[in-house]
Amino acid sequence: MVGEKKRRVGFVGCPPAEVLGAHRSAELIDLDNMIEGTQPHGESLLPRTTCRIIRRVLDNALSLDLDEIIVDEGYGKCDAARGLAELLGDLLDVPVIRTQNDSREGVGTPISDSDLPLLRKIELILDGLVNPQETELTPEPKPRAAMWGVPAADFSIYELFPDGTQVLGWTRCVENRTPADWELEMYVPEGVPTVFFAQTFCPKNVVAQHLAEKHRGLHVDVDSVLSQPVRAKIEAFLRFRRAWD
Amino acid sequence: MAVLGDFGTTWTKLVDTETGERRVIPTREAAARGQRADIATGHNARRWAARHVNELIALTQGGQRLIEERELLVLDVGSRDVKYVHVRDGELLGMDWTATCGALTGFTLELLGNYYGIDYTTVRPSAKSVPVTCGVLGMEQLFELVSQGVPIEEAVARFARGIAMNAYRFIGEPKEFYLSGGMCENRLFQGSFPEDVEVRPLGRFVLVEGLIPELTKNGRAAK
């Protein structure tokens, strides 16, 4: 109907394609992303040891006037996301659709493997959940570095890496639309200097640290803003592992 | 000719590559006089230098210039943070830098020395320690000891032991390591590590030394 307000549907994680597809006529909002103007309404509702992304999802959900929320709480998500779905259902007077994306039918990872700057790759991967990507991509045959992990709360971390840095870990799984594909998440090419990243308090730090040891990489965790010590560690690691040569 | 600087939170270390002159001045004095450097590292370096090199890179390169061994582990204890690098055969095996746990430890030790008028060359290290999660929490423990009747010098020695043990665990409890930074001049701190551990002081200019290779990268010859 002319003049009818477009429905606003928020989503968490990487819900199944068919679930998101059924809501394409609505304004789809990725609640994991930073949204300008959102207020920290949820600060007192979560334990201090909650990761920044879960905090952000709650703040976004409480700040935006949503009509519906879709939460991927499958194997690819953590207990915190499942708990958050419960919390949102109790707090808000909107339907919370709990869904599980356990797909193994990958759509490929051309962005992760392209020659683009790392920051642009992450933007394209996340934006791709809402808008199908049509960017022209050129593969990077010899990535000088790789970054494993989940999308960071502070995107400035991505600016520390050389162009063409390969995207690994859960972010790669998101591009592939298989967020629960553990085998793909564990994929680390040999010989590429790799930074293993997880948000502070995220359980993925266990495997991030282990993989860093196993592959002679660097493990870092960041809560909200990238600190000077973590920035320095990444810069030193990439420099002494000759990622810039 | 170039001026190289390590602009720390409390102290600024400067080297003039032309004359070889080395100076240590309070950072607040450096700020007041508008001290500049061509290349610098340290907490305040971005404010006063044309070019900034991060502290871990400076520490690694400084260690490699000063130590002629195939393996080196250098711990730098600053006013506000603790960091280390571990290199073997030119390859960086490990590094870390904490400005949260262990924060303000060096600063607090200096503060306590001035407050109580303690000469750290005469204080005997203690076998006991206080838990020093950070400088502020550690100081709370220290004042508690003093209020219980523990002599001030013993309480401060336990505090120093707490800082030393934190730093020692932070670097993985090696049998020997090199020490960099202002704590190289604090005999109590150096004596507060476990007895069977060899602590080799490198002095306060390790990070500035690590800036020298940057001169050639800048198109100028290193002296």
Image (cartoon, coloured by chain):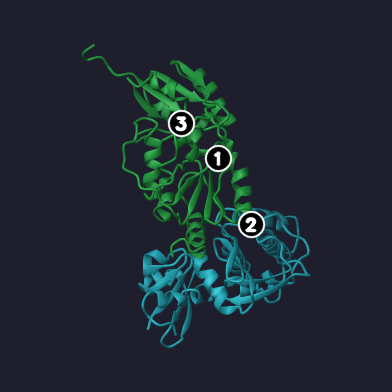
Chain colours: A green, B cyan
B204 or A8: nearer the viewer: A8
Q: Give, as a three-letter code, the residue at label 2.
A: Met
Q: Chain of mark 2?
A: B
A101 or A209: nearer the viewer: A101
Q: CA distance from mark 2 to mark 3?
A: 39 Å
Mark 2 or mark 1, whichever is nearer to me: 1
Q: CA distance from mark 2 to mark 1?
A: 45 Å
- x and y, in percent, of residue A9 in the image: 38, 22
Q: CA distance from mark 1 to mark 3?
A: 23 Å
Q: Residue at x 61, y 77 (%)?
A: B202
Q: Are marks 2 and 3 in contact (CB under 8 Å)?
A: no
Who comes first in sequence, dot 1 or dot 3?
Answer: 3
The residue wearing badge 1 is A185
- x and y, in percent, of residue B221 in the image: 40, 82
- x and y, in percent, of residue A115 in the image: 38, 50
Q: Chain of mark 3?
A: A
Mark 2 or mark 3, whichever is nearer to me: 3
Query: SS class of the residue under badge 3?
Result: helix
Q: Residue B29: which quarter of the image? A: bottom left
- x and y, in percent, of residue B140 in the image: 65, 53
Q: Chain of mark 1?
A: A
Mark 1 or mark 3, whichever is nearer to me: 1
Q: Give, as a three-letter code, the residue at label 3.
A: Val
- Tell me if mark 2 has few (under 14), some (14-19) or many (20+) residues whose alpha carbon lies within 10 angstroms of its own: many
The residue wearing badge 2 is B139
The residue wearing badge 3 is A57
